Image (tube, rainbow, N blue to C red):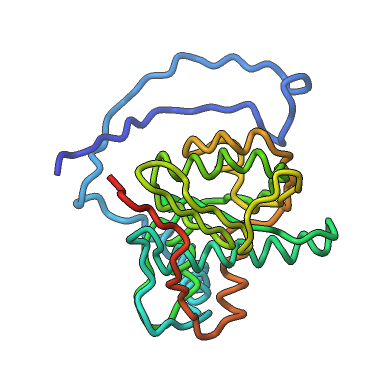
Amino acid sequence: MKNKFLLLGIALAALSGCKTASTAPSMHLGKVEIRKNISINNELKNDEAFVKTIAPYKQKLDKEMSQKISHTSVDLTKQGDNSNLGNLLADYTFDGANEWAKKNLQKNIDAALINIGGIRTTIGKGDILLKSVFEVMPFENEVIIVKMKGTDLQGLFDYYANRQVNNPVSHLYIETDNGQPTKTLINGKAVNPNQDYYIATSDYLALGGDNMKFFSKGEMIPTGLKLRDLFIDYFKKNPEVSAPADVRLNFTGKK
C-alpha cells in the first residue's frame, strides 16, 4: 500500500478561553514554515501514552457494545423485495412512531416506510449485540411523521410502481404489474381520498431522499426520536426476534 504523508506544521490559535472574535486581542502570526513530512505507515509506532490514556474508556465502550439485547434464530438479511430485516425494522419504525403519536398527537400512525440503503448490513442468527444495531444503522436519522391527504398517497404508490425498489414498508401493501400499481392497501384497506393519513419515515426520506418527492405534499411532524435508538429499544423489548416474512411489495413483471 502506498505511503500516506502527514504534513506537519505549526498551528497557532488565538481562541484561548473560548473568547469571541470581538473580545479576543489581535495577534500577529509570524512566518510559518514547514520543516518536514512524516510518512504514515505500519512502521510508525503507536503513541503509548495516548493508548494507555484511552484504554479504560475503550474497555468500557467495548463492554457496553458487546452486551446482548436480543436473539434471532434465523439470519436477518436485506435481500429481496420483502427482506425479513427490512420488514422488521419497518415494523419497529411503525410501532415506535405510533406510540409517540398516540401520546403527542392523540392519533394513530397508518403506515411506515424506510429506505433499504439506510440498512447498512445484515444480522447473523444468534445473539444480537448492541454493536450490531450500530453497524446496521450508523446514521443519526430522526423519525418524521408526514401527514398526507389520501389523494397524495398516489405519488407514493406510483413511486414504487415506477422504481420497483425494495424500500421496506409496514402496514402497506403495494402490488404492481409492468410498472403500474394494480392493488394498494393501507392497514388492509383501500385508500380513502378524503382522509388524512399519518406516515412514519426518516428525516432523510421526508426531505426527498431517494427521490421520494411525494412527501413534499404533506405536513412534516418531527418526533425527536432517533431511528437507531428506537430499533435498540424494540430489540430489547423482544428478547427473541420474530422475523416477518410476509409479502408487502409484489412487483409482477419486474424488470
Q: Position of residue 22 (x, y in %)?
A: 77, 19
Tell me what residue is drawn at x 68 percent, y 16 percent.
26
Quadrant into which the N terminus falls: top left
Task: Find residue 73 and report its horizontal and vertical position in percent.
Answer: 39, 85
Image: 177 above or below 135: above
Q: Quadrant of the C terminus?
A: top left
> In the displayed structure, would residue 219 be above or below residue 79?
above
Give 111 or 60, whichever is nearer the viewer: 111
> In front: 232, or 198?
198
- From the viewer's perspective, tell me whether residue 49 is left or right of residue 21: left
Asked if residue 17 is positioned above or below residue 14 in the image, the reply reads below
Q: Is residue 74 left or right of residue 139?
A: left
Q: Furthest residue to the left?
A: 1
Instruction: Please tell me in which quadrant of the rendered image residue 81 appears.
Output: bottom left
Q: Is residue 187 left or right of residue 38?
A: right
Q: How many marks?
A: 0
- Could you say where residue 13 lies in the image, as x and y percent from the top left? 58, 28
Q: Position of residue 106 (x, y in %)?
A: 85, 60
- For the point 74% across and 66% down, the residue is 99
